[in-house]
Amino acid sequence: MPTLESIGNNLLNKSVVVSEEALVAPVTVPEVTSRSAASNAAAAGPAYIVLGGISLSHFLNDTMQSLIPSVYPILKDSYALDFAQIGMITLAFQFTASLLQPMIGHFTDRKAQPFSLAIGMGFTFFGLLLLSVAQHYLVILAAASLVGLGSAVFHPESARIARLASGGRYGFAQSVFQVGGSAGTAMGPLLAALIVVPFGQPSIAWFSSIAFLAIVILWRIGHWYRPQITTRKAAAVHADANGPSSRRVMIALVVLVALLFSKQLYVSSLSSYYIFYLIDKFGVSTQAAQLYLFVFLAANAAGAFFGGPLGDRFGRKYVIWFSILGALPFTLALPYAGLFASAVLTVFIGFIISSATSSIIVFAQELMPHRFGLISGVFFGFAFGIGGLGAAVLGRVADHTGIAFVYHVCAFLPAIGLLAVFLPRLPKTAY
């Protein structure tokens, strides 16, 4: 009769057959659940082609989305809209994405859809076409909602793909993914100044070609993603003995949501109304104001890129502390600065405050790795929702008090970053 020892030896010596597909895949599991898995992922290294493709898709996606606030001056003049109606357009776009992203993330936790990204980009494609021909305010709201729907489908699954392709460098992968979106957001006002302002609302239809390019790229990425889904196995997630308790996890998630609130609401105030602020206070042209907005958004893109690797190196909690609270002196000075000084200050604000994005998202993902899609959807969706709700509220305030007053109030938002003191210290393996 075989002994337990002999049975164990036979099992340990049993050969393992690895498919060719699995050999070339850098990561084949959705989360790192042990120290050995983290070492294997790091040894494989990031899948740079996939990361580049998903970042480029994020760039194209957010370039198209950023066209909406960039054409606000045209829509305001053409349809005699007030600031509250402008805010409602932002709300229609971002609230759609906010509601649907957590639902989509929860669904894809259970059953990932490799080609959903390409299908979601189709909603953006049709939304842009509708916006280019819209002649009524309700049609504009419907077009903005379609673009928001495309965003709701895109972000949770693309964030998952970025993590799968990370090779264990999660902050770096999230930054590469985020910098594509931030660069696209920065590019929107520049393209609006060069194309939409001279040629008018119908020229928005030209950008549907960008959506078509993104659909092609995402379809190819879907082919890479499909074998990752079919080969990965659902594994039980064991809590790290050195990790925070479930109560501290919930407190940390609430804190991260509050930090994202302070960051995104301030960024939304600049993205939606900075053009009007410059026109009202300094009398610059619409095109010049859009170029100043481009400078701020470009600084956002740079900060988003550097924040993730710094979080991998020094710890995400320290990057969050610096990026949220470090922007406070510059936001307090902005309402009192001249035109040139305002441009300089927005560079510092954009760079510092956006460096928190990757660290906040990865921190939240590592707190609840068994709900990766849901957490990604909640945080991406919350960012959109807060931006939309905040834009609507700030628009109403601006109608009654003036746009300059809005920036005096928003200057104190980064002070919410003091809540970072309640974030737990994660185990070193999470970094």
Image (cartoon, rainbow, N blue to C red):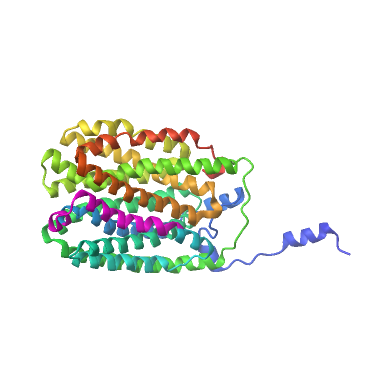
Residue 95 % position (x, y): 35, 55
The extreme right residue here reads 1
Can residue 427 be seen? no
Position of residue 367 in the picture relative to residue 419 (left or right): right
Determine the residue located farthest toward the front in the rendered image.
400
Q: Quadrant of residue 345?
A: top left
Q: How many dots with numbers?
A: 0
Based on the picture, tell me whether residue 422 belongs to the magenta stretch. Answer: no
The vertical placement of 269 against 232, above or below, is above
Of residues 307 and 13, the one nearer the viewer is: 307
- In the displayed structure, 61 sits above or below 398; it is below
- Tell me where the magenta segment starts and ends, as one range: 75-102
Identify the image quadrant of residue 411: top left
* Placement of 25 over or under 344, stated as above or below: below
Q: Is residue 92 magenta?
A: yes
Is 266 or 48 nearer to us in this picture?
Answer: 266
Overall secondary structure of the magenta section: helix
Q: Position of residue 138 (x, y in %)?
A: 24, 63
> Relative to residue 16, is residue 388 drawn left or right?
left
Residue at image point 16% right, 59% down = 196
Q: Position of residue 312 (x, y in %)?
A: 47, 43
| Quadrant (top left, top right, bottom left, bottom right) of the N terminus | bottom right
- Residue 140 visible to an observer of this rendering: yes
Which image quadrant is residue 205 in? bottom left
In this picture, residue 97 sits left or right of residue 131: right
The structure residue drawn at horizontal position 22% and vertical position 36%, both measured from the top left corner, is: 405
Give the residue displayed 31% in from the left and 40% down from the top: 351
Residue at 22% x, 42% y is 398
Q: Position of residue 2 (x, y in %)?
A: 86, 63
